[in-house]
Image (spheres, coloured by chain):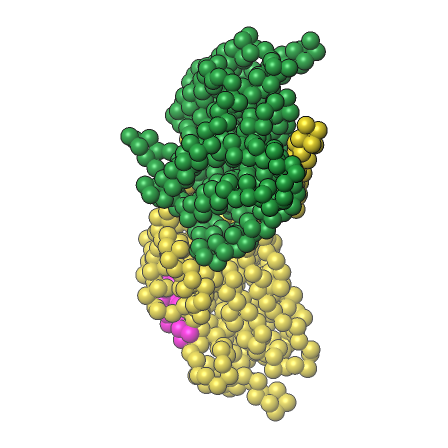
Chain colours: A green, B yellow
């Protein structure tokens, strides 16, 4: 009972956040008041209410906070995008709606997920195809060769590749250790060779497509799932070692990898050309300070690609570092809720799937925020749920839907 | 199962550490590096903030615009200097890379002030519907005279400076320094300007320190008239050189011998011998006191400019040579053209030195006067009687003496020539600086001028000619 009250309170705060944010946008409209902002705010609140109602009413056993946290992040993102470029925010609203729809559909329509554990090779083939698509069809946008366009829509196949990779790893690692209890260590390792090769091939594709951010996230997902599946720290250390060696080789081999490190080392030296993005992002964050300049009062438009990769800088500038910290804390809370899901799950496949998707979202947030604040070399990926981007939105909501579904199944079986 | 839960916990812990590390890193950068980050030249935010207000216009005294700001985009504007190089030293410039100079610098806050207070914005919810325009600045410059002065000075192909003042108010009517620069093309020219040996960025009118030569005799004359009773009517025998204790201290220009002369003739013909011995009679202290009354060795207030102090040296009583030389504006005496213009202006204004002003009025963007500069006296630097004697002497220079070239038919021009020796290089034979200070008309002076043409030869030549032409331009 207590938890329902808490949840309602949190929901109220989310509405309040949405209302305040879009009221603010209403007041700062360019020519007088901006009615569009109000309409958008109302629509977003309605979608909140609707999604929450469906989940509460029909699937009361699952985790309620996953959807709540993701809604908070999405509303902050849409508010910021609206301030930067209102037509873009409208598109983002559509993607958000589609994302919520995907989330609900996954929860409503998917049969029990444990059945999907047996299609290991299907996932493997999907992964390999999606990973290689960028190298074959890709046209270089923003220096990376990971966008492809089909029928007018451009999207990143590797984003979808992440989904199938997690599914593949979950399917292939689920039996690890079972029936092998008494057998030799060597046989255990043998079971890891095939997934290891698939991961390596995927990482190779990522690096050649200059999509270093995705490569990093892939690695984080793989190593986490490996640890959860095997409980063996040795494997993790070996993988880390291999990753460092691989990283060193690609540093020597590829100019774009070296460039990333060079900019990271001293962005100011390259402030006029290669380091422009990072430098402008750092200035943007610094000029906002702890409390920000206030929505509409800063100059986040001086930062390139501020609607997607650099949205964290734009938010920090106008809403303050405190909002930035709040976003990071929200990601961690969401990660925490997501990682609770597999505990109640019964079969290994769904557990690993849940771990994989949770890690995916958290790692992505860490890598892009670390990049825009200059803590790690910058890699162009989106901040899940906050950044502008259709494929990112849909994929994130899809994985959250899967997590919701797993939590639902896990709770109801018990 | 327990194993699994523990693993999950460990993974959560790792991520918690990562998130905390990231937040700590951001906090660290906020606390320790953000100041440096904001000061970076890549930070265009300060200029963007400024550019919300369209910069105010600078006008000449008749309200003709000298600058014009136009908006390029929301966060940038282009400032055009309508008269180019002729006004650049007076007005200065504003540039996102090279910063601010001149009036643009001194009045930056006013030029950027659109008069909108934070309170009115809060109370009236005022939307930025109408464009914000900074206050305007009405200078005292006379465009016609300024352009003419620049043209005349440029034509000589010599470096130099011209200052024209209204003796009654201290208004700067013209202020020119050659070589100049075009503030419209700073990006293109700045590198060359900074390395050019002729230092075009220097405003010679207020910062150029030159030996004044014979124009300084005006101050020596004032000092003598006020310190040595009866000096005006005393006779003097000028044999072409001044010899004290067997050492020749100085000689007249071109070795001229004037014979028996009086005070007036000595001034009109610029006798070095007479004024050199006058300097010895006065002594270093008395002459220095008079010079300091004229603001030598002192900072002078001025509206819209910073004037470098002119210098008059201190000598021991046995340094006769230096004392005699200093009385004719040589030795270590250095003066700015502005200082010498003020000397002429004080003579013209009954001995009252007026504080120079370049800005007359600050106007709101709608033309309402917000602040006016009232004329201020710097002091009575000589008695009215001395001033009237000096006026007469200076008139004589143009009618009977060395300054004939400054004469203009129909206007009673008065003045004093100066031919100042200077040693750029001990061995090099360089021409003297050509100086002229003057005022007109004689009865009711409305303009006082100082001209220096570097290495322009005798003062009665180039500098006197330029002065005559400027008087004609201004008074006819």
The structure residue drawn at horizontal position 57% and vertical position 85%, both measured from the top left corner, is B249
- Look at the image and give the residue range highlighted in magenta: B455-469
**Residue A203 sits above or below residue B452 on the image:** above
Outermost residue on the bottom side: it is B246
Q: Is residue B239 left or right of residue A92?
A: right
Name above or below for residue B141 compared with residue B157.
Answer: above
Measuring from the top left, give residue A227's x and y in whole percent.
62, 38
Q: Nearer the viewer, residue B177 or A338?
A: A338
Q: Residue at x 56, y 31 (%)?
A: A174
For the residue pair A220 and B368, the one nearer the viewer reads as: A220
Nearest to the observer: residue B14 or residue B212: B14
What residue occupies the far left of the structure in this picture? A151
Residue B66, image x, y percentages: 38, 46
Residue at (33% x, 30% y) in the render: A153
Measured as percent of width and height from the top left, residue B447 is found at 43, 55
Task: Assess whether residue A314 is covered by the magenta stretch.
Answer: no
Residue depicted at 61% across the width and 79% down the height = B322
Would you say residue B468 sits in the magenta stretch? yes
**Residue B72 appears anywhere in the view:** no
Q: Residue furthest front?
A: A182
| Front residue of this view, candidates B389 and B241 | B241
- Left or right placement of residue B472 versus residue B238 in this view: left
Q: How many marks?
A: 0
Q: Tell me residue B6's x, y (percent).
A: 70, 32
The image quadrant where one finds the N terminus of chain B is top right
Q: Is residue A378 visible?
A: yes
């Amino acid at each position: 009972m207590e938890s329902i009250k808490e949840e309602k309170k949190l929901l109220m705060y989310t509405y309040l956040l949405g209302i305040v944010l879009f009221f603010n946008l209403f007041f700062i409209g360019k020519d007088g008041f901006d009615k569009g902002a109000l309409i958008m705010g109302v629509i977003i609140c309605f979608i909140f209410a609707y999604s929450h109602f469906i989940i509460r009413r029909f699937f009361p056993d699952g985790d309620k906070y996953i959807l709540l946290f993701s809604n908070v992040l999405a509303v902050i993102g849409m508010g910021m995008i609206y301030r930067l470029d209102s037509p873009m925010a409208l598109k983002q609203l559509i993607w958000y709606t589609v994302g919520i729809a995907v989330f609900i559909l996954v929860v409503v329509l998917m049969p029990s997920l444990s059945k999907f554990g047996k299609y290991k090779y299907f996932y493997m083939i999907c992964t390999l195809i999606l990973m290689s698509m960028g190298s074959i069809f890709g046209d270089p946008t923003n220096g990376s060769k990971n966008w492809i366009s089909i029928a007018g829509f451009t999207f990143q196949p590797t984003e979808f590749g992440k989904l199938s990779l997690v599914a593949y790893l979950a399917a292939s690692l689920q039996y690890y250790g079972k029936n092998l209890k008494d057998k030799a260590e060597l046989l255990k390792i043998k079971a890891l060779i095939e997934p290891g090769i698939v991961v390596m091939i995927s990482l190779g594709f990522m690096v050649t497509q200059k999509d270093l951010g995705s490569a990093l996230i892939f690695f984080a997902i793989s190593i986490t799932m490996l640890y959860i599946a095997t409980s063996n720290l040795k494997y993790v250390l070996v993988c880390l070692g291999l990753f460092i060696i691989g990283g060193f080789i690609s540093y020597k081999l590829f100019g774009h990898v070296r460039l990333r490190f060079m900019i990271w080392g001293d962005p100011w030296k390259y402030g006029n050309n290669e380091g422009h993005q990072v430098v402008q992002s750092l200035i943007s964050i610094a000029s906002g300070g702890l409390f920000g300049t206030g929505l509409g009062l800063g100059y986040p438009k001086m930062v390139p690609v501020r609607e997607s990769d650099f949205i964290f800088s734009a938010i920090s500038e106008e809403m303050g570092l405190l909002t930035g910290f709040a976003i990071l804390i929200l990601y961690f809370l969401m990660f925490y809720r997501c990682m609770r899901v597999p505990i109640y799950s019964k079969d290994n496949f769904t557990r690993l799937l849940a771990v994989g998707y949770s890690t995916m979202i958290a790692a992505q947030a860490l890598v892009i925020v670390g990049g825009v604040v200059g803590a790690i070399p910058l890699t162009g990926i989106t901040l899940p749920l906050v950044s502008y981007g259709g494929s990112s939105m849909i994929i994130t909501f899809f994985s959250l839907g899967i997590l919701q579904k797993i939590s639902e199944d896990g709770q109801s079986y018990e | 199962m327990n194993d699994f839960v523990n693993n999950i916990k460990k993974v959560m812990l790792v991520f918690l550490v990562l998130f905390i590390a990231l937040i700590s890193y951001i906090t660290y950068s906020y606390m320790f590096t953000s100041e440096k980050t904001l000061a970076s030249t890549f930070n265009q935010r300060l200029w963007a903030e400024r550019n919300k207000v369209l910069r105010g216009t600078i006008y000449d005294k008749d309200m003709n615009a000298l600058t014009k700001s136009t908006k390029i985009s929301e966060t940038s504007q282009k400032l055009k200097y309508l008269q180019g190089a002729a006004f650049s030293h007076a007005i200065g410039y504003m540039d996102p890379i090279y910063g601010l100079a001149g009036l643009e610098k001194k009045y930056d806050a006013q030029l950027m002030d659109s008069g909108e207070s934070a309170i009115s914005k809060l109370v009236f919810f005022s939307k930025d519907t109408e464009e914000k325009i900074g206050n305007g600045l009405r200078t005292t410059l006379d465009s016609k005279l300024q352009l003419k002065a620049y043209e005349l000075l440029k034509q000589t192909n010599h470096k130099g400076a011209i200052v024209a003042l209204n003796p009654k108010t201290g208004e700067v009517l013209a202020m020119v320094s050659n070589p100049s620069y075009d503030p419209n093309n700073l990006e293109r020219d700045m590198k060359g300007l900074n390395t050019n040996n002729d230092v075009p960025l220097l405003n010679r009118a207020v910062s150029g320190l030159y030996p004044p030569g014979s124009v300084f005799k005006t101050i020596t004359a004032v000092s003598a008239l006020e310190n040595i009773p009866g000096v005006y009517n005393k006779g003097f025998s000028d044999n072409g050189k001044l010899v004290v204790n067997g050492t020749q201290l100085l000689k007249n220009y071109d070795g001229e011998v004037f014979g028996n002369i009086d005070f007036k003739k000595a001034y009109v013909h610029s006798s070095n011998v007479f004024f050199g011995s006058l300097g010895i009679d006065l002594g270093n202290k008395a002459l220095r006191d008079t010079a300091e009354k004229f603001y030598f060795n002192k900072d002078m207030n001025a509206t819209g400019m910073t004037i470098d102090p002119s210098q008059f040296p201190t000598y021991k009583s046995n340094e006769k040579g230096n004392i005699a030389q200093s009385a004719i504006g040589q030795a270590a005496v250095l003066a700015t053209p502005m200082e010498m213009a003020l000397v002429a202006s004080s003579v013209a204004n009954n001995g009252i030195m007026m504080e120079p002003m370049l800005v007359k009025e600050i106007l709101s963007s709608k033309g309402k006067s917000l602040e006016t500069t009232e004329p201020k006296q710097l002091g009575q630097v000589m008695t009215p009687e001395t001033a009237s004697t000096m006026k007469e002497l200076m008139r004589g220079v143009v009618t009977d003496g060395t300054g004939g070239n400054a004469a203009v038919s129909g206007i009673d021009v008065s003045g004093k020539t100066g031919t100042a020796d200077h040693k750029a290089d001990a061995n090099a034979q360089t021409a003297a600086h050509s100086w002229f200070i003057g005022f007109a008309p004689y009865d009711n002076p409305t303009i006082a001028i100082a001209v220096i043409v570097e290495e322009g030869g005798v003062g009665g030549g180039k500098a006197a000619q330029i002065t005559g032409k400027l008087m004609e331009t201004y008074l006819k």
